Image: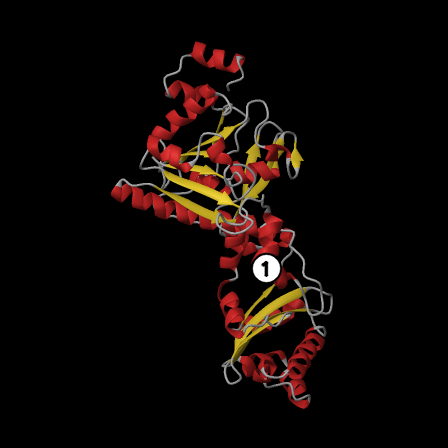
Amino acid sequence: MAERAGPLTGVRAVTCSTAQAGTVPYMMMADLGAEVIKIEVPGVGDGSRTAGELRGEISSFFETNNRGVKSLTLDLKSAEGRKILHRLIETADIFGQNFRPGAAEKNGFGYEELKKINPKLVYVSVSGYGQRGPHSDLPGTDAVGQALGGISEAYAGPGEAMKTGVVSVADESCAMLTFGGLLAALYHAKNTGIGQKVETSLVGGIVRLMGWTMTTTMWRDENPIVGARINGTRELPGIAASFDDKDGKPLVFQVDHRHWTKAMDALGFLSVLEKRGASDLGLALVSDEKKQLILSTLKELFATGSRDRWVSILRDADIVSAPINTLLEASKDPDVVENGYIAERYYSEIDEILKVQGSPWQFSETPVSIGRAPKLGEHNDEVLEAMGFSKADIKSMSDRKII
């Protein structure tokens, strides 16, 4: 049986992107069958090739963010290198870069220049702060996105200092929004023949990730309750909160006003809450004292039993609940594994099977294909020969460090 093609088969992307937010959108494209040509500096490459955990020359960071793409080395400071890039742009659907605003223009691959070569081109630019604010010219990293976008508050408990998290949520949220944006622009270009520039940023990604909680915060003009998500109104409250069990293992549950009493009764907590005057959840929205009483009572009660027991009771009562996984626990969670969100690959160069990121998608007709990250310049000959360069031409460019 012939292997089925991915949903983006036939789409070509050329990228001058590094790090994480700048590469993950195109890795996703490659997973879905697109041809992605990553431009790297000859002899140097993307600096993240040695980031993260190393197994031989295999980097957990680079492998996760660049699998399935092709590596072409080009000296874009040379006229010859820029000319090759421009020729690639003639046949590309997407071009991506995450340089500081203004740097692409200085190096010969700004939007205005490339759209003259290919008017259908979707030009994707990822920045740290966004390209219109007072700090648009500053470099940005995941930490900047987390710090400015508001998510740090989500990591802090009551009375704790805000901090950024260990997981690159700004990079990843920006990458996923970039992926969606470039596909929308690609759809428009395919229908109209008109390309455009798509801009995203690390800060913008986190602000979007804050969702309705950001909206509620703005409407109330005050920060949300930390330590638990208590929302709604005095009459129609809801809660999503996490607590530790007797062994310090955390769990989460979420319930609205319709099922609050049912959940507390199932857990055996209702009588204690009633005795303490803490059974009316809506009071948490109008009285800080009552809020603290409700949360402290729940904290005390959850600490009397095991996480597995509490989660089982709540799920049996049809209440949303789950254990809170560490990263390692998440990688072994049965729902994560069975749905293919984590996969395994054999790496012949180290004779080892390693766990890798799987795919968040399941397509019934056009399956996802998980590839390997390329070695530096691995596809120089393939890409350049397809462009019409001879082996002698390629050797000459290699000798002169053009590639």
Residue plotted at (61% across, 63% down): 154
Seen as rendered, the residue at the extreme right is: 247
Q: Where is residue 77 in the image (x, y as percent from the top left)?
A: 51, 24
Give the secondary structure at mark 1. helix
Question: 99 or 271, which is in the foreground?
Answer: 99
Seen as rendered, the residue at the extreme front is: 134
Residue plotted at (40% across, 48% down): 181
Seen as rendered, the residue at the extreme left is: 192
Q: Position of residue 285 (x, y in %)?
A: 58, 81
Q: Can residue 51 be seen in this view?
A: yes
Residue plotted at (69% across, 70% down): 158
Hey, which quadrant is residue 367 in on the image? top left
Using residue 297 as the reference point, say whether residue 189 is left or right of it: left
Q: Position of residue 350 (x, y in %)?
A: 63, 29
Seen as rendered, the residue at the extreme top is: 392
Relative to 226, does residue 355 appear above or below in the rendering? above
Hey, which quadrant is residue 316 in on the image? bottom right
Residue plotted at (39% across, 27% down): 86
Q: Is residue 360 visible?
A: no
Give the labeled residue for mark 1.
151
Hey, which quadrant is residue 325 in on the image? bottom right
Which colouring convention does the figure follow?
A: secondary structure
Using residue 304 as the reference point, say whether residue 153 is left or right of it: left
Relative to 325, does residue 269 appear above or below in the rendering? below
Question: 247 or 134, which is in the foreground?
Answer: 134
Q: Position of residue 387 (x, y in %)?
A: 37, 21
Location of the N terminus by quadrant is: top left
Question: 31 or 12, which is in the foreground?
Answer: 12
Q: Which amino acid does label 1 sit on?
A: Ile
